[in-house]
Amino acid sequence: MHFNSIDFAIFLPVVFMLYWFVTRKSVKLQNALIVAASYLFYGWWDWRFLSLILFSTAGDYAVGRKMAGESSQTKRKILLGVSVAVNLGFLGFFKYYNFFLHNFSTAFSLFGRGIEANSLNVILPVGISFYTFQTLSYTIDVYRRKLEPVKDFVAFSAFVSFFPQLVAGPIERATNLLPQFHKERTFDYSSAVDGMRQILWGLFKKIVIADNCAKYANVIFNNSADYTGSTLVLGALFFTFQIYGDFSGYSDIAIGTSRLFGFNLMRNFAFPYFSRDIAEFWRRWHISLSTWFRDYLYIPMGGSRGGTWLKIRNILAIFIVSGFWHGANWTFIVWGALNAAYFLPLLLTKNNRANLDIVAQGKLLPDIKESSQMLLTFGLTVFAWIFFRAENMGHAVNYISGIFSYTLFTAPDFPGVGGALTTSILVAVFVLIEWQGREGQYAIANVCLTMKRPLRYAMYYALLIAVFWFGVKEQQFIYFQF
């Protein structure tokens, strides 16, 4: 079930009414309703994969309960190892089996030893990368004694399967979300209104910005050999705003929907394209994943506390693993390595935390230095996104080669170039709204509150009309494939 579908438009109000009018007197009943609604929401794609969520839930619940009464550190490590092995085993099989098999066969053929290896038609379960990391955060934190093991299986099931963020995050920490399932929830009108506002902004990002950019990004990337360098640059720019509008739009809808039910999820995006360096970009992009890797991989490996070579090793590891998390393709690994190359000079010169504040805070416009920093960072990001979007490494190399040719200085020309102008104007308006609202949790959080009521509602209706007017055929969210 997609957030941008008629199905969800019916599903959400029904669950909301049952939650606040039928089960509101009992936290246990509310949790049970969330589990039932979440399983229905996920099973809408393919009911067969519900068994994976149930198995992961039951397994990590049992590991947590076993740790509760275990004083032996050795046995606790074994239990944690079981959880990690099972979760990553499922993830590895469904997501990476064919990738490793293909590369294993290729490696043998290079030495003149061909081998027969049969790939499997493995269907990737939607959201497996997200809920796997979410349950792992629980067992790791229980092992570290940062969290008491849960006794209530229904509450734990609700935490694992919570439908707003089940398939594409934010990847919630057990220490943040799980305790909320044990607390009594009361309806908060102002919080619900804010949630609806964030949902509206998320739908605008997805339907108006991302989906319209996708039309032209797909045409250009899928036929890149036919187009000029300037057209290829335009395609990379369209994809840059497609992936941001798509993924951050999903996060906005997830966070807003959670607020309707009395839950607070972590922020996942903080205006990353206004970053002044790559380190700042990664503090603002997919925050739930980058902080997950920081806390559960980077810091345990030594972080930035060791010598130069240790720092380089850890940064390369964290970015390459992050790239590999996104998919079983060398393009994602190169994308991660490229971001590591961007990041390392900042770390080694101790400038990776130079920009912790909001750019041009309290000012209308950035100064020349900030503008040049943002432009450079944005350019590096756009270049890296080419690898992320390309079908394979050959496609990426050819795409980049096509950009750096004499045709870079010609006018873009491709089917639908007239419609692309309208989309470009929409993107420009979107960027202006984001810039104006960059000091809020999301772009229209504060902007609308400072407006007089007639103007505020006029903006709401304008966004809603844009969603219907510029909406294209229902498109899946990009990160469902990860």
Image (cartoon, rainbow, N blue to C red):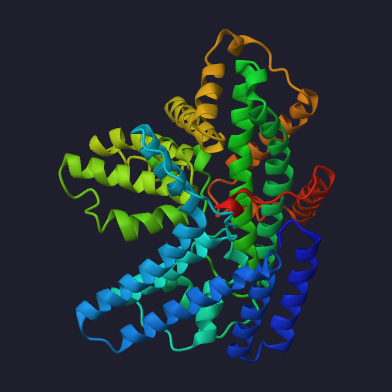
Figure quadrant of residue 427: top right
Q: Residue 205, image x and y in percent?
A: 67, 47
Q: Residue 17, image x and y in percent?
A: 75, 79
Q: Is residue 179 visible?
A: no
Residue name at image x 32 percent, y 86 percent = 68
Query: Residue lying farthest left?
Result: 307
Q: Is residue 195 visible?
A: yes
34 or 395, which lies in front? 395
114 or 470, which lies in front? 114
Query: Residue lying farthest bottom?
Result: 25
Tally of marks:
0
Position of the N terminus by quadrant: bottom right
24 or 439, which lies in front? 24
278 shown above or below 194:
above
Residue name at image x 71 percent, y 59 percent = 2
Q: Residue 360, image x and y in percent?
A: 48, 38
310 shown above or below 173:
above
Residue name at image x 54 percent, y 85 percent = 154
Residue name at image x 72 percent, y 17 percent = 413
Q: Residue 171, image x and y in percent?
A: 49, 62
Query: Residue lying farthest top?
Result: 406
Q: Is residue 257 left or right of residue 453?
A: left
